[in-house]
Amino acid sequence: MGRSCRLLVLSPLYLLTIFGFLAAADAFSTDNDTCRSDEFTCANKRCIQRTWVCDSDDDCGDGSDEEDCKPVTCGPSEFACSKNYCITSRWRCDGDFDCPDKIDEVGCKYSNGERPSHCNKDEDFDCDDDFTCIHKSWVCDGERDCPNGADELPTRCHNVTCRPDQFQCGDHRNCISGHLYCNGKAECVDGSDERNCTGKTTVCDPSTQFECSEGSCIPLSSVCNKHRDCIGWEDENEELCGVNECSKNNGGCSQICIDLPIGFRCDCNAGYRLIDNRTCDDIDECLEPGTCSQFCLNEKSSFKCSCAPGYLKDPRNHTRCKAAEGHASLLFTRRHDIRKVALDRLEMTDIVKNTKMAAALDFVFRTGMIFWSDSSEKKIYKAPIDEGNERTVVIDDGLTTSDGLAVDWIYSHIYWTDSKKSTIELANFEGNMRKTLIRDRVQEPRAIALNPLEGWMFWTDWSDEARIEKAGMDGSHRTVIVDNDVQWPNGLTLDLIGKKIYWVDAKLNIIGSCNYDGSGVRTVLYSPEVLRHPFSITTFEDYVYWTDWDKEAIFKANKFTGESVGPVTSLRTLKYPMVVHVYHPYRQPDGMNQCQAVNGHCSHLCLPAPRINSKSPLLSCACPDGLRLLPDGLMCVEKVSTTVAPTTQEISKPFKRLEPLNVTTAVHPTHSTDGDGKGGLASESTDPGLVAGIVIGVASFGLLLLASVALLCYRHYLHRNVTSMNFDNPVYRKTTEDQFSLEKNRFPLPTATVGEEAQEPLTSPGTNDYV
């Protein structure tokens, strides 16, 4: 029998993918021995930008970039902090601590006599770090919620009363979460949470143990060994020892029967499970989160994984999917800058410098534009990611505190939350067409995420009734999807391929997950040590990434199991890490813009409608604040009040431009869309005279247009049938021969050929001028 030799041919893309994975693995495991000429080499061999040396920020992680720093001379437009640090003079006495030593707010006189607070003093507790506000009910509850621990200082907290969902320790000063009571580990300092706990019922492992009648377990090797180990001696029953129950009808097992010293047990082949101790059924491995990275197809005794377009299976593990192209990076905001860190080589660079208090962040990968909000300046900016210092103001008025911002990369809109105004608003990329989308039944919205492919938006609300909600991107079909086991949902992100939501809760110290409709809620990771104070979260491939205020770093973990927890950046190197996003083209997949053609026939805003079923509308027309939608669902009109003493008459007219009218007017803002997606003022009546005038005008114009077209057609028809003749003799004599010649040319004789007629000049005597 001959042996054939086969040549294995691998595609270039597959080879590049394999080499890319190996290179990425090497990049994470290899330390940098040398840095580029424009970088600084830290004592721990890390490389940082030279501009970060001696900036009062420990970027190396070992403090080597802040050693041997020379005194700094500040410019004439700068204010000198006491630690070789300069800030712009306009930040002096603005109510924010910008100097590391807070000297910029010393000796300042404020309008109300005290430094302004960004927190709601009636409902919130100010952690005195210029960022964090917590509910007053969380003060002295035994859990450190402020990053600086100001809510649990001994000088503030004495005997405390715990919430109903907490357990009060024996010292009457500390509280722990109720689910930690009697969990086998002492959380209270005095160990009172593990006292008087009811013992758990012992369950024996049937594959290795034998259960005695009193509930104790002994090894199978001790059964039928002529030594009585159980109190009731049932392990040495002479009638049962040595009997093989599997020899008869396979013991009644559907697949595998295993004989035991006493009795037997049924088992199943790989890929099957017992459903009634005897019958085996197929295991649906796809029900287990993380069996496959993306798509899972259950098969008999097995399963099959597949990847979304643009992803390839990891050659080292075919259940995992990796992006076939692009290099993923993390974009994140800090207080005074916006930075990017490459995930394949852990190289960090700054994109935007000298921000006042950068908070929320998002991007448009297609155009390379980033958007961010500044909580201190109360503005929203945008800038090219490669030229971050060339910033442009997008929203410069009416903004108070925006901790959440999301970009609709398909329909070119930005959405943001405002926790002080308790609203969710939107505008286009230029800051025009601004609309308040949600303003009812929302208290303290924070994070927001969009899925323009299906027309949905999701946001968190960390008020007393903390929850996660979703609504159409036009404001319709609003619903609460998570309202249990959530207290401080700071961050929110979407897995567009798996159609799941991930969030971080800084109060419960968890990373949670659920489906778009709120089903399948599960805790991915719970750890008071790792999740000290998470603020923002993002996801890519098999991992979630989050920022932590307490540890001042960015971490990652497996998004299915919560395992493989590790820091992406060194601990204590990122002061005030805020919002983080994975920067990669697959985070913003291409989709159909239903409004691209004539703006969806909308006069102003054209927004994606939520995909509820196959018959759902694809788009929805909306109006900016100050306008309302007519019953046709397309046209926006402005509402004008003309004052005529002693009465006021209101008129409505089609809105054509934003220039002010010559009369005294008062523009009334419209309400946001309700749960049915209809404008709040859509039911108001329209002036019948105006409608009648429009109808008559359109009808008259149509009749006039039809008459003109008919006249032109009639004249053209006559012109085509007029016979024109040329004569050599200027004297015209009407004869029988001439008439015959005329008729012959109008109706050619059958004997004439096409070639002969084509050779005759069009201007020859007796032919038509119009052919």
Image: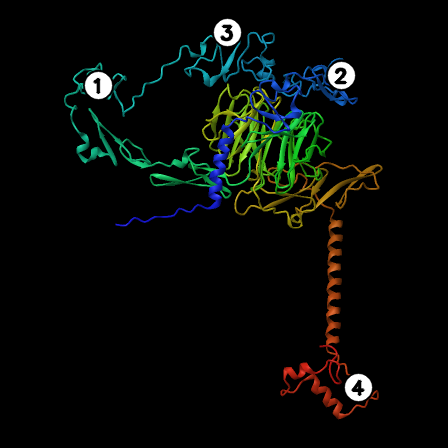
Considering the numbered disc 3 on the image, is that residue within a helix, a strand or a loop? loop
Using a 10 Å C-alpha cutoff, classify the residue at mark 4 as few (fewer than 14 neighbours), some (14 to 19) or many (20 or more): few
Give percent across and percent down for residue 324. Answer: 51, 41
Do residues under tags 2 and 3 come within 8 Å of each other at their CB atoms?
no
How far is disc 2 from disc 3 in space, using C-alphas? 41 Å
Please state which of residues 720 and 534 is positioned toward the viewer in this rendering: 534
Residue position marked by numbered label 1 in the rendering: 222
**Compared to 275, does 532 lie above or below?**
above
Residue position marked by numbered label 4 in the rendering: 727
Snapshot quadrant of residue 771 = bottom right
Considering the numbered disc 2 on the image, is that residue within a helix, a strand or a loop? loop
> Horizontally, is 154 left or right of 430 in the view?
left
How far is disc 1 from disc 2 in space, using C-alphas? 82 Å
Considering the numbered disc 4 on the image, is that residue within a helix, a strand or a loop? loop
What's the amino acid at mark 4?
Answer: Phe
How far is disc 1 from disc 3 in space, using C-alphas? 48 Å
Residue position marked by numbered label 3 in the rendering: 171
> Horizontally, is 481 left or right of 354 in the view?
left
> Horizontally, is 130 left or right of 18 in the view?
right
